[in-house]
Image (cartoon, rainbow, N blue to C red):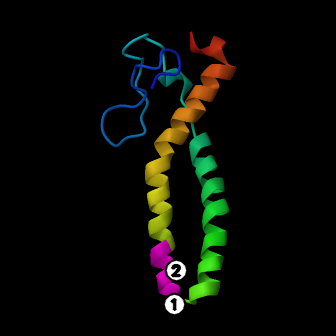
């Protein structure tokens, strides 16, 4: 959703992370203030914080083969990225709008 009006779409249609040029409702120029690599950096921190302890605990309890770790944690990391990268990117855009409103006009 648009950080100003809360009604317009932030992303282009489909499974993309591309931000629309302007809000459909309030015409806020969204593409000029893209979040860049910030969401990806947050994802690296989140994945490291969640997956490393989980993998170590899983290994201590079940002692699986190395290929099980490779398949399991790759799938878990991809699922976490797929389902959380858009909300994190939207959150970073909203934070930019809140803390630097003068650069949006």
Within-10-Å neighbours for mark 2: few <14, some 14–19, many 20+: some
Circle 1 sits on which residue? Answer: 65
Q: Residue 102: which quarter of the image?
A: top right
Q: Residue 2, image x and y in percent?
A: 47, 22
Q: Is residue 71 magenta?
A: yes
The residue tagged 2 is: 69
Using the image as rendered, state which of residue 89 and residue 33 is in the foreground.
89
**Residue at x 63%, y 28% (from the top left corner):** 95
Q: Are marks 2 and 1 in contact (CB under 8 Å)?
A: yes
- 73 is higher (above) or lower (below) than 33: below
Q: Is residue 56 left or right of residue 83?
A: right
Counting from the top left corner in percent of width and height, residue 56 is at 65, 78
Q: Which residues are magenta?
A: 65-72
Count the numbered circles shown: 2
The mark found on residue 54 in the picture is: none
* Neighbour tally class for label 1: few under 14, some 14-19, many 20 plus, Cα within 10 Å: few
Q: Secondary structure at mark 1?
A: loop
């Amino acid at each position: 959703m648009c950080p100003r009006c809360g009604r317009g779409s932030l992303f282009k249609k489909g499974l993309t992370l591309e931000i629309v040029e302007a809000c459909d409702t309030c015409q806020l120029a969204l593409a000029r203030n893209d979040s860049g690599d910030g969401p990806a950096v947050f994802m690296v921190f989140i994945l490291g914080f969640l997956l490393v302890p989980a993998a170590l605990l899983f290994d201590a309890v079940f002692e699986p083969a190395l290929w099980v770790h490779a398949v399991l944690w790759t799938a878990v990391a991809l699922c976490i990225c797929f389902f959380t990268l858009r909300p994190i990117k939207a959150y970073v855009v909203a934070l930019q709008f809140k803390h630097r409103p003068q650069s949006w006009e």
